[in-house]
Image (spheres, rainbow, N blue to C red):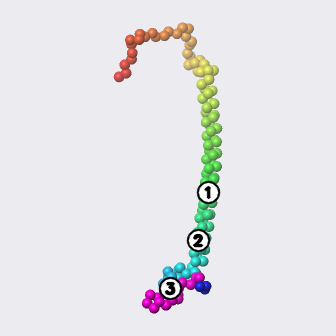
Amino acid sequence: MSSYCQINRRSPRTNRILVGARNVWDNFTSCEWKGWGLGILAVAMLFGYLFEVNDLSIKGFEIKALEQKIAGLEKEHNDLKFTVAKLQSMGDLQGAVRVQQMVKISQAEYLNTSPDVVALNK
């Protein structure tokens, strides 16, 4: 073990250098565990990366499905607009008049009201 990794502590009573660990946590901070810590960190980062890539690919599939749904709804919307325009056309309205057996009037009569007469909303 190199001197860089060695943990040197001095005893408070004798002021001598203590060699070795006094408890479990002293071993945890030594150089032997530093390699494990980096390995565990690398594995955790790898799993995090894989999780994010997987999540991103799932979102891509969801976006593609929603874009296809939007395209289908836009087509349906355009078809409905065409149907409304066709049903509102003058030829279709005249056909509906014939089906309901309406007749043309020869002269329109309009109601004349005096300016003094108003409707009262109660």
Determine which residue is flagged by label 3: 9
- The stretch in magenta equals 4-21
Q: Secondary structure at mark 2?
A: helix
Q: Which mark is residue 41?
A: 2
Give how far across and how far down residue 99 sits, in percent.
58, 19
Q: Crowding at label 3, few (<14), some or many (≥20) Cα neighbours within 10 Å?
A: few
Identify which residue, 3 or 32, lies in the foreground.
3
- Amino acid type indicated by mark 1: Leu
Q: Secondary structure at mark 3?
A: strand
Q: Is residue 92 above or below residue 44?
A: above
Q: Is residue 16 above or below residue 104?
A: below
Determine which residue is flagged by label 1: 56
- Amino acid type indicated by mark 2: Leu
- Identify the residue at image location x=63%, y=60%: 53
Question: Marks 3 and 1: in contact by CB < 8 Å?
Answer: no
> In the displayed image of the protein, which residue is found farthest to the left?
122
Q: Quadrant of the N terminus?
A: bottom right
